[in-house]
Amino acid sequence: MTEKLFEFLVYLSIIQGLTIIVLIFILRRKKMGPTLDLYVGNLPYSVKDEQELKRDLSNDVGQVNKAVIVRGRKSDRPHCYGFITVPEREACKFLDSPEVMYKGRKLRIRHAFNKQKRR
């Protein structure tokens, strides 16, 4: 009897732990609020680190949650474009700025659209 009670208590504590993790994830997601994905073109080839791009754009224009630099499949060399995820309230700062300069190049920032499946 005590073994079954012990097993039940172990399972109950595991379920409670998972519930707490899910609640923390939901609360963090609500705190961040809605976000938008933006296309960033005309990046210099010297940009290799997403964290550097994220930090520099956050300091110059507005908050950036995530940055991704698109790379070649075979060469792993960065292409001249990427994507950033920004809060909706910050997106207008990026889209309305006439010139966002990054390492001497004028960036093209536009709304990112989902890629349609090719047939």
Image (spheres, rainbow, N blue to C red):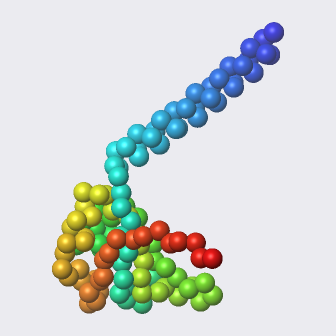
Residue 81 shows in the view: yes
User: Which quadrant of the figure contains the N terminus?
Assistant: top right
- Which residue appears at 79% of the width and 16% of the height? 4
Q: Quadrant of residue 106?
A: bottom left
Instruction: Say left or right for 99 vs 26.
Output: left
Q: Is residue 50 above or below residue 101?
A: above
Instruction: Say left or right for 66 vs 56.
Output: right
In x, y percent, where is residue 108? 30, 82
Q: Residue furthest top?
A: 1
Q: Quadrant of residue 94?
A: bottom left
- Which residue appears at 47% of the width and 42% of the height? 25
Q: Is residue 25 above or below residue 44?
A: above
In x, y percent, where is residue 37? 38, 65
In x, y percent, where is residue 96? 19, 72
Q: Is residue 86 above or below residue 108?
A: above
- Which residue appears at 75% of the width and 21% of the height? 7
Q: Is residue 110 above or below residue 23?
A: below
> What is the total number of numbered labels drawn onto the structure image?
0
Residue 84 shows in the view: no
User: Which quadrant of the figure contains the C terminus?
Assistant: bottom right
- Which residue appears at 42% of the width and 82% of the height? 81
Instruction: Say left or right for 57 vs 30.
Output: left
Q: Quadrant of residue 13?
A: top right
